[in-house]
Structures are given as C-alpha cells and as structure tokens.
Image (cartoon, rainbow, N blue to C red):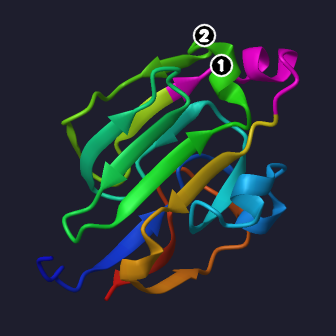
Amino acid sequence: MPEIPVTDDTVLAPVDGAIKPITEVPDDTFAAKILGDGFAVTPATGRIVAPVSGKVTTVAQAKHAVGITTKGGLEVLVHIGVDTVQLGGAPFTMHVKEGDQVSAGDPIVDVDWATVKAAGKPTDVIVVFTNPAIIGDLSITATGAVATGSPIGSVTTK
C-alpha cells in the first residue's frame, strides 16, 4: 500500500445552519459512527457546498449523497438528510458528477427542503470521514450557527 502524504485540510461548513456532533444525528448508523466520525448541520438554506477539496468519487443514484476524496486520500461523505434515498432524487439538483474536481466551498447540490420535510425526513446534512484509519487528527471547533463555506475545523491524515 502506498504511503499517503501528510495533509492538513481545513473543513468548511457545507451549509448555513446549526452545527452539531454526529452522535446527535437521528440515525443509529451515523450516530454510532459506524461509517466514521464527522459532524452534522441542521440546515437553514438549500445550497450544499463541498466541505473539502478533492475528486468527486461518488454521486448516489438517489442524489442524496456525494463522496469526495482529497489529494491526501481522505474519503469524505456528504449525506443530505436521513432516509432521503427513499425520495428517489426528487428534492435534489446536482452540480457535480463523478470524476469532477471540486474546491472546498464549491456548490455540489441544491436541496428543496420543503419536499424533504413533507416526506417526514430529518434534514441533517451529515459529513462523515469514512476511512478513519488514515486520520491523525479530526478537530471540529465550531459551535452553534455556521455559515456556508466558513472554516469549522480541520482534519489531518497520518
């Protein structure tokens, strides 16, 4: 396995709203950190931006999740809402496709939260670092209200 270079990546807020620990997400898989550690934002707006720079490696068929891999090999999942895969992509307008390069802060998807809420789904925007074995340090320092694209912490790979 090739050695992954040490990087120190600033993590940006993916959306305006209130930041909270991943353990408070109303989904056991995320709250128990089964997919990895991270954070969530209860959104106040519908534009979701890339929290890190990298290559878009996954766009879920239901458009509810985007995977980004950083230059340092960190895998970042941006999951929009809880159980929103069941909505079949209806409330999501994608701005990226697999293979795209994104810079932190670039728009990745717009969400019609009224449709998500009408379906009775939680609106948390969840950011998960899915390959924890390469993380040296994850520090999310922001609390309370966050603004789209503002620095909220950092993650360092080993």
The local crowd at label 1, few if under 14, some if 14 to 19, many if 20 or more residues have their Cα within 10 Å, is some
Picture residue at 18% right of the left edge, 79% below the top: 4
Three-letter amino acid code of the residue under disc 1:
Asp
Say which quadrant the N terminus sits in: bottom left
Span shown in magenta: 110-121
Residue that sits furthest to the left in the current view? 2
The local crowd at label 2, few if under 14, some if 14 to 19, many if 20 or more residues have their Cα within 10 Å, is some
Q: Which residue is mark 1?
A: 112
Badge 2 marks a residue whose secondary structure is loop
Q: Nearer the viewer, mark 2 or mark 1?
A: 2
Badge 1 marks a residue whose secondary structure is loop
Picture residue at 76% right of the left edge, 62% below the top: 31
Picture residue at 37% right of the left edge, 60% below the top: 75
Residue 116: say if magenta.
yes
Picture residue at 14% right of the left edge, 83% below the top: 3
**Residue 36, percent from left and from top:** 56, 66
Who comes first in sequence, dot 2 or dot 1? Answer: 2
Of residues 69 and 147, the one nearer the viewer is 69
Q: Judge from the rendering whether residue 46 lies leftward or rightward of residue 107; answer left or right.
A: right
Say which quadrant the C terminus sits in: bottom left
Q: Judge from the rendering whether residue 22 lies leftward or rightward of residue 36; answer left or right.
A: right
Of residues 16 and 23, the one nearer the viewer is 23
Q: Is residue 127 above or below residue 65?
A: below
- Residue 154 seen: yes
Q: Which residue is mark 2?
A: 90
Q: Judge from the rendering whether residue 27 lies leftward or rightward of residue 87; answer left or right.
A: right
Whether residues under marks 2 and 1 lie with C-beta atoms below 8 angstroms apart, the answer is: yes
**Residue 95, percent from left and from top:** 36, 25
Per the model, the C-alpha gap separating discs 2 and 1 is 9 Å
